[in-house]
Image (spheres, rainbow, N blue to C red):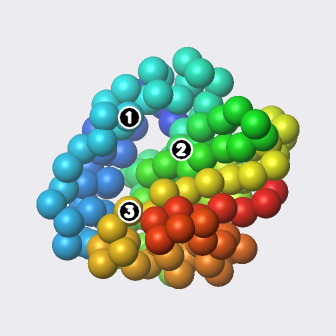
Amino acid sequence: MKIIKYENQYRDDTIFMVLEAKNALGRVPTLNNDLLDLDGYYFNKGDMFWIAVDDNDRVIGCVGCNLLFDGEASLHRLYIKYNLKQQGIGTKLLTIAEDFAKNNGRKMMKVHLGDKTTYFESRQFYSKHGYSYTDEDHMVKAL
């Protein structure tokens, strides 16, 4: 497994992996607008989006990071292929996003958790990695 900066050749595979991950969580698989325009939502603004690819060059995970004002950054779309969770892929993606934010002068990482009945795993994951609640649906971590 390797983590790389997203490239357009992985567009369909990334979208499919995210939809598959949402389906495995019992959600109606809908597509977020940023995944249809990663250049506009991330790269053209100086932000980043990474994918994890397996030995067969298939997308198995992803994460985006937006650099905000006032020393903050925000995580987006941290998804792991449903049958590959608990193997450290999410931790590696989170670490690369946090390092990117730190290297760009950000002191705080924010994340929106989504619905607590569906995204219960994310709440445990971020807590395990030092994030704390600011309200019921948001967590932060000092970088």
| Residue at screen point 38% across, 62% down | 114
* Residue placed under numbered mark 1 in the picture: 34
| Sequence-first tag of 1 and 3 | 1
* Residue placed under numbered mark 3 in the picture: 114
Type of the residue with mark 3: Gly
Q: Residue furthest front?
A: 135
SS class, disc 2: strand
| Residue at screen point 48% across, 57% down | 112
Q: Residues within 10 Å of mark 3 (few under 14, many from 20)?
A: some
Q: Determine whether, in the image, residue 71 is placed left or right of residue 120.
A: right
Q: Residues within 10 Å of mark 1 (few under 14, many from 20)?
A: some
SS class, disc 1: helix
| Sequence-first tag of 2 and 1 | 1
What quarter of the picture does the C terminus occupy? bottom right
Can residue 52 be spotted in the picture? no
Q: CA distance from mark 2 to mark 3?
A: 16 Å
What quarter of the picture does the N terminus occupy? bottom right
Q: Which mark is residue 64?
A: 2
Q: Is residue 122 above or below residue 71?
A: below
Quarter assignment of residue 67? top right
What percent of the width, then of the height, locates residue 23? 20, 65
Q: Is residue 21 above or below residue 101?
A: below
Quarter assignment of residue 71? top right
Type of the residue with mark 2: Gly
What percent of the width, then of the height, locates residue 72? 71, 43
Type of the residue with mark 1: Asp
